[in-house]
Image (cartoon, rainbow, N blue to C red):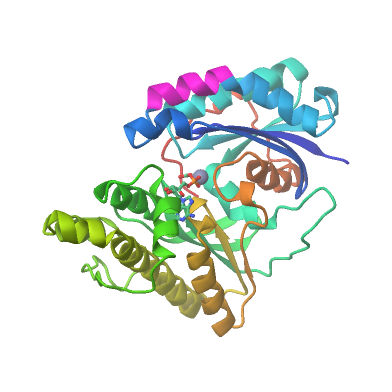
Amino acid sequence: MKNLILAIDTSCDETSAAVTSGRKILSNVISSQINLHKKYGGVYPALAKRAHQERIDPVIREALKRAQTEMEKIVAIAVTYGPGLAIALEVGINKAKEISSSFKKPLIGINHMEGHLYSPLAQNKNGKPKREIIFPALALLVSGGHTELVLMKNHGQYQVLGQTLDDACGEALDKAAKIIKLGYPGGPIIEKLAERTKENKYPLHPSMKQKDSLDFSYSGLKTQFLYLVQKMNQKEFNQNILQLAASFQLAAFEQLIRKTASGIKLYAPKTILCGGGVMANQRLRKDLRKLAKKNKLPIFFPPFKKLVTDNAAMIGVAAGYKLERKEFVKNLKELDREPRLSL
Ligand code: KG4
Ligand code: ZN
């Protein structure tokens, strides 16, 4: 294998390192902190930082070991420098700089959302699946921190068409789960409950700010859901948890589908790419596949489970294209965390 990249991501609550070669993944080690943060119902930044510091070295060692390689064979180091939690990002950046300077390897800075965008193109070490993007591509990126519709004109060329004006879709699912007293993270729990009922017993239609734009908004939906639950007595609430989960999920996804449909109409893309933690959801995948089929468009999701939520392999795949273009960090001091970095 040539052009091996060691990639690192510590943007939120997963400490991850991977070894990639172009689009091929040789290893993808993820140490999740979900159990640490569960009792806070969300990510607790200071705890995340400490956990990243404790785990980063063993995670990198394991990534090299699983790829059956060593530092000498690595051609470049890639690291996420934003968006994300500032003190968490810093741990990965500092480690990447340290390795880059001690082993004299070039450093590549990657936008975490660019990683999610490239996740559908990742392959196993045998080069499967073989997928090709035909440009322009329309990417729908839906995670805990972001909800974005992006037009990709070529590798490395992005135009953000729409993004959330308030909460991200994953964040809204997490908050809704909290409102109905379920655990964290809420997305997968809501999916499991919603699967068990077909009803839309509580149709939710919050009024949307900027209805005609491609921007998203989830705070109105969350507020409407909160009022709905607050008005219920205990018995009604207990008997309708499945229906509440299903109705919230439906309304949350309806907005994603509607805006993606508008994006297709306005920009006539030739490929649809889907990435981010919420894409783990089978119902959402089904609805998006239906939309793509209606428009006769190929649609690609992350091909392996570990590529959906945060991971370093997707950072390595994105970095592969920057390596081809020799887009390296010129001066190590220049690379700093950018918590609000956009595409
Ligand atoms: O991409 P990700 O791991 O982290 C960020 O970069 O934010 O996304 C995490 C988000 C959480 O909000 C979580 O609730 C959501 O993805 N999520 C899901 C599912 N699995 C994770 N949402 C809906 N259905 C799922 N199966
Ligand atoms: Zn992410």
Q: Where is residue 72 in the image (x, y as percent from the top left)?
A: 84, 23
| Residue depicted at x 48% and y 66% | 284
Furthest toward the right, the residue is 1
Q: Main secondary structure of the magenta part?
A: helix
Which image quarter holds the N terminus? Answer: top right
In this view, the residue in front, 322 or 254, is 254
| Residue depicted at x 52% and y 52% | 276
In this view, the residue in front, 290 or 238, is 238
Can residue 97 be seen here? The reply is no
Furthest toward the top, the residue is 102
**Magenta stretch: includes residue 47:** yes
| Residue depicted at x 67% and y 53% | 304
User: How many numbered marks does the figure carry?
Assistant: 0
Specify start and end residues of the magenta stretch as a single range: 45-54
Can residue 193 be seen here? The reply is yes
268 w.r.t. 143: above or below = below
